[in-house]
Image: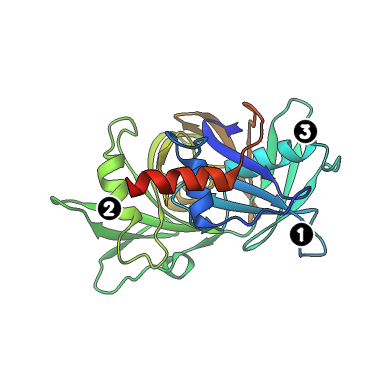
Amino acid sequence: MQGSGNDFVVLDGMSQAIDMTPERARALADRHFGIGADQVLLVEAPSHPEADFRYRIFNADGGEVEHCGNGARCFVRFVHEQGLSRRNPLRAEIATGLITLHESESGEVSVDMGRTRCGPEAVAFDTTGLESSACGIDTLWHLPLPGGGEARLSLVAISNPHAVQVVSSAATAPVLEAGRHIESHERFAHRVNAGFMEIVDRHTIRLRVYERGAGETLACGTGACAAAVAGIRRGLLDTPVTVHTRGGPLQVSWRDDRLRMTGPAATVFSGSIDIDELVRQQSARRGL
């Protein structure tokens, strides 16, 4: 499945028991020797009494993460297409709580993204010895970059951690170099998603994101939400915000502390695979 070009392997853990491990997730996400995906999504029975399903996310590097906005849209489409539920809206259990999802007649999916938190504590960021500056109601943290210069970061948690900076041009921003440095910087205890935001007008931005454990993707739903929140807190944007990603536009609104994202979700193909055989083949190749 894909949501704005952010692509996923989605697995039905309701009709069968799936023990997802980092090794299995990496094998499935491998674009040359597996199926290929930015993330692997697993739909399971919930443990929370108010949830319809449990929704788990594994990055291409095998690590399990807290949230994925584009994946959440694909999750609800998958549940409806597979006949697992007719409920609309749906409530899904993620690692940090519950989210609500609604599929419209047009096929677009809206996701209430859950609690939004801002600041160093929200993303487990060590500020020791760093300079900071005020911008609107936000605090920007000045992170030195290799080769000189610095990134002035807004820190936002949309269940998962984001560091957003404003750039003059998203198209020419050094996303691969600076993004890789920020994503794995030792000051972020759990690593971070690095966003590069270009302000077009007060309701429009262009965005690229170097995702934690996946690298740059065509779109990042939680990254779009984090960028919109950062821009509004900086005094540069007003809600609602159209976020233009390389995979297409997403709509984000933030009112009364309620954060909602809307965008497309589509099934590309479906099938079955022997995960253990896939892992065995990849292990054998590594042994050559």
> Which amino acid, mark 1?
Pro
Mark closest to the chain's N terminus, 2 or 1: 1
Q: Tell me residue 192's x, y (percent).
A: 41, 56
32 w.r.t. 165: above or below: above
Q: Nearer the viewer, mark 2 or mark 1?
A: 1
> Which amino acid, mark 2?
His
Q: Residues within 10 Å of mark 1 (few under 14, many from 20)?
A: some
Q: For residue 123, which quarter of the picture?
A: bottom left
Mark closest to the chain's N terminus, 1 or 3: 1
Instruction: Work out whether residue 193 or residue 18 is closer to the camera in this orientation and state it.
Output: 18
Give the residue pinned by disc 2: 181
Disc 2 and disc 3 in contact, CB within 8 angstroms: no
Q: Tell me residue 232's x, y (percent).
A: 49, 48
Display coloring: rainbow
Quarter of the image with the C terminus in it: top left
Give the residue pinned by disc 1: 46
Q: Residues within 10 Å of mark 3 (few under 14, many from 20)?
A: few
106 w.r.t. 255: above or below: above
Q: State the SS at label 2.
A: helix
Q: Tell me residue 219's x, y (percent).
A: 49, 36
> Which amino acid, mark 3?
Glu
- Report how far apart the C-alphas of labels 2 and 3 lie in the structure: 40 Å
Instruction: Work out whether residue 205 or residue 53 is closer to the camera in this orientation and state it.
Output: 53
Q: Which mark is residue 90?
A: none
Mark closest to the chain's N terminus, 2 or 3: 3
Q: Residues within 10 Å of mark 2 (few under 14, many from 20)?
A: some
Quarter of the image with the N terminus in it: top right
Q: State the SS at label 1.
A: loop
Give the residue pinned by disc 3: 81
